Image (cartoon, rainbow, N blue to C red):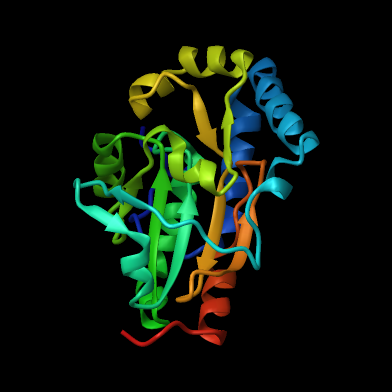
């Protein structure tokens, strides 16, 4: 599960805008993935958009649910504890098997130090097991914790969880994306990708949830937002 650009680069040192990285990966899918497989993924995204799934997720102005879950190393991470130190940047991702998650995580990794300097903590949440999260963090040299959201419990609180349709389950199974194994959970549920900024008082001040897993907010947009409204000094 090593997702890189066509030209190998050092993880964490990607200098291109994230939109360019994701565009390249979309192009590779068009070029190399069979059209019938692409159509299944497109139908899944279209169904989520039709159901207005992202619109029903928590948005700006809502209070963020608290959570207390283990990270990639088994250490318990508490959102309330982190918020006592400042703002919180939370990325909900699907897993290390998704090239778009990998692209986003490497792009966020490149600005992790600047996020911390702005008084915020950065973390990612996915339903994958602790072992998968550990592998992802180690392989891509990520400098922030990857939290283990067993059964998508936290994603469900944010209104992000959905069940993968059967025709997409079949595609994933054929391409070694065995979610029951990767997530340690037979539900075949995933979160739609989302990025939140939560202020020290627990309010959501930035929200970007998108049914289309190929689109993610630009890290510099998030950083610019934090620098304009910095969290409490550490």
Lateral position of residue 197 relative to residue 40, left or right: left
Please name whichever residue, 72 or 151, is drawn nearer the observer in this view of the structure.
151
Q: Residue at x 41, y 37 (%)?
A: 127
Lateral position of residue 19 relative to residue 98, left or right: right
Q: Position of residue 103 (x, y in %)?
A: 48, 50
Q: Position of residue 79 (x, y in %)?
A: 37, 61
Position above or below: 154 against 42:
below
Residue 163, picture quadrant: top right
Q: Residue at x 65, y 68 (%)?
A: 61
Please name whichever residue, 118 or 155, is drawn nearer the observer in this view of the structure.
155
Q: Residue at x 66, y 31 (%)?
A: 30
Please name whichever residue, 65 or 118, is drawn nearer the observer in this view of the structure.
65
Residue 39, picture quadrant: top right
Using the rendered image of the protein, determine whether residue 5 is visible from the camera's viewpoint. no
Q: Position of residue 185 (x, y in %)?
A: 38, 24
Q: Residue at x 67, y 41 (%)?
A: 211
Position above or below: 112 against 77:
below
Please name whichever residue, 71 or 213, is drawn nearer the observer in this view of the structure.
71
Using the rendered image of the protein, determine whether residue 179 is visible from the camera's viewpoint. yes
Q: Position of residue 97 (x, y in %)?
A: 42, 33
- Quadrant holding the N terminus: top left
Position above or below: 168 against 154:
above
Farthest residue to the right: give it: 50
- Quadrant holding the C terminus: bottom left
């Amino acid at each position: 599960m090593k997702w890189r650009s066509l030209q190998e680069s050092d993880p964490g040192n990607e200098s291109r805008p994230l939109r360019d990285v994701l565009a390249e990966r979309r192009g590779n899918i068009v070029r190399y993935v069979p059209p019938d497989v692409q159509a299944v993924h497109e139908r899944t995204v279209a169904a989520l958009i039709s159901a207005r799934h992202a619109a029903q997720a928590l948005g700006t102005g809502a209070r963020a649910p608290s959570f207390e879950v283990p990270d990639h190393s088994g250490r318990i991470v508490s959102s309330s504890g982190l918020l006592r130190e400042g703002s919180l940047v939370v990325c909900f991702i699907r897993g290390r098997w998704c090239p778009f998650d990998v692209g986003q995580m490497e792009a966020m990794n490149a600005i992790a130090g600047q996020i911390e300097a702005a008084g915020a903590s950065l973390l990612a949440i996915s339903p994958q097991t602790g072992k998968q999260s550990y592998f992802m963090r180690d392989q891509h040299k990520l400098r922030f914790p990857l939290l283990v959201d067993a059964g998508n419990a936290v994603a469900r609180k944010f209104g992000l969880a959905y069940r993968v349709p059967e025709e997409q389950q079949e595609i994933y199974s054929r391409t070694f994306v065995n979610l029951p194994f990767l997530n340690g959970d037979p539900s075949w549920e995933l979160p739609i990708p989302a990025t939140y900024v939560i202020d020290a008082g627990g309010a959501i001040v930035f929200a970007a949830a998108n049914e289309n897993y190929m689109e993610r907010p630009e890290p510099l947009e998030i950083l610019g937002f934090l620098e304009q409204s910095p969290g409490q000094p550490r």
